[in-house]
């Protein structure tokens, strides 16, 4: 029985993703990768890609914690009832980041380093990158870089320039930072889900923590409103409390209206939330010093 190659396994995984997401055709960069000469390095590359794409498309383990038939619109509300759901989501996303980093990590090379002028010229080249590429592997890599969106191409260019200069540690650090930036920080679907879970969890926790207190009704609702806002901020802290207050105000305002304790105006509301966030940031800074 013939063993399935790593390229065939990856191709099968990718075809499933393309069919599931109704993608019209395979990405152009795959044509470049498929055209690379057969080698152990190429086999390892496709094995790493297969592992990463499988991890990205595998259903999250938190899906077992919510009722069967839960819709996408109510998933965050159900996940908020599971105490460890956000940690599980974060750990799974970090696993994908790790797999992505390993896939792009460049091992040290025993080959002589190029002249520094050559490295500098490559590192500062505009797109599309033009270079003398008589070497087949180098030509394929340049084609791969030039086929990417410029933001990704710039990262690949910087990482490869570090590698060319023998700065493997710096190259792999860029790799990890890029993976985290793309798959976590700027991953809108992931961040949106986490924020929605936080919002629903805030409703559950703040309502529960104050339900048994015989406080003045207005003071109690103000406490609920503030606690909800600070819960959002603690889940995704920002170096700029002013921007954070503007970003989170829509959710905070909706919650305030839902408990019958609205802000008097949008301006007053944003300023109030800003003061809460600024005090929280200052308290955190003091505790860290």
Image (tube, rainbow, N blue to C red):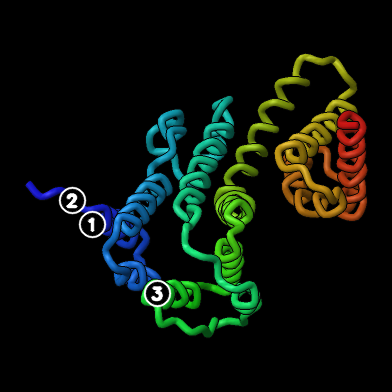
> Which SS class for mark 3?
helix
Q: Residue at x 15, y 48 (%)?
A: 3
Callout 1–callout 2 Cβ contact below 8 Å: yes
Q: Nearer the viewer, residue 122 or 230?
A: 122
Residue 17 in picture, x, y percent from top left: 34, 57
Residue 211 in picture, x, y percent from top left: 75, 19
Rounded to the nearest angstrom, the CA distance separating label 1 from label 2 is 6 Å
Q: Residues within 10 Å of mark 3 (few under 14, many from 20)?
A: some
Q: Residue at x 92, y 43 (%)?
A: 275
Residue labelled with disc 1: 8
Residue 85 in picture, x, y percent from top left: 54, 31
Position of residue 254 in the picture relative to residue 220 (left or right): left
Residue labelled with disc 2: 4
Placement of the C terminus among the 4 image quadrants: top right
Rounded to the nearest angstrom, the CA distance separating label 3 from label 2 is 25 Å
Callout 3–callout 2 Cβ contact below 8 Å: no
Position of residue 280 in the picture relative to residue 15 (left or right): right
Q: Residues within 10 Å of mark 1 (few under 14, many from 20)?
A: some
Residue labelled with disc 3: 140
Callout 3–callout 1 Cβ contact below 8 Å: no
Q: Is residue 85 visible?
A: yes
Name the N-terminal-most of marks 3 and 2: 2
């Amino acid at each position: 029985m013939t063993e399935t190659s790593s390229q065939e396994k990856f191709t099968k995984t990718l075809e499933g993703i393309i069919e599931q997401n109704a993608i019209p055709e395979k990405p152009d960069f795959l044509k470049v990768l498929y055209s690379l000469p057969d080698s152990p390095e190429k086999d390892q590359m496709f094995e790493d890609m297969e592992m990463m794409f499988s991890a990205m498309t595998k259903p999250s383990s938190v899906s077992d914690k919510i009722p069967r038939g839960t819709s996408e619109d109510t998933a965050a509300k159900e996940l908020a009832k599971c105490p460890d759901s956000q940690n599980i989501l974060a750990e799974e996303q970090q696993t994908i980041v790790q797999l992505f980093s390993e896939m792009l990590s460049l091992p040290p090379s025993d080959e002589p380093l190029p002249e520094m002028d050559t490295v500098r010229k490559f590192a500062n080249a505009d797109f599309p990158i033009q270079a003398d590429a008589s070497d087949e592997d180098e030509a394929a890599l340049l084609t791969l870089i030039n086929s990417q969106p410029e933001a990704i191409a710039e990262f690949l260019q910087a990482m490869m320039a570090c590698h060319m200069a023998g700065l493997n540690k710096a190259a792999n650090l860029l790799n990890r930072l890029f993976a985290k930036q793309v798959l976590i920080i700027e991953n809108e679907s992931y961040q949106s889900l986490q924020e929605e879970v936080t919002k629903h969890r805030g409703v559950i926790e703040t309502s529960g923590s104050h339900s048994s207190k015989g406080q003045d009704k207005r003071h109690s609702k103000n406490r609920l409103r503030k606690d909800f806002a600070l819960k959002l901020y603690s889940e995704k802290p920002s170096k700029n409390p002013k921007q954070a207050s503007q970003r989170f105000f829509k959710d905070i305002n909706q919650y305030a209206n839902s408990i019958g304790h609205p802000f008097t105006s949008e301006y007053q509301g944003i300023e109030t939330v800003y003061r809460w966030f600024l005090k929280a940031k200052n308290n955190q800074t003091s505790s860290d010093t």
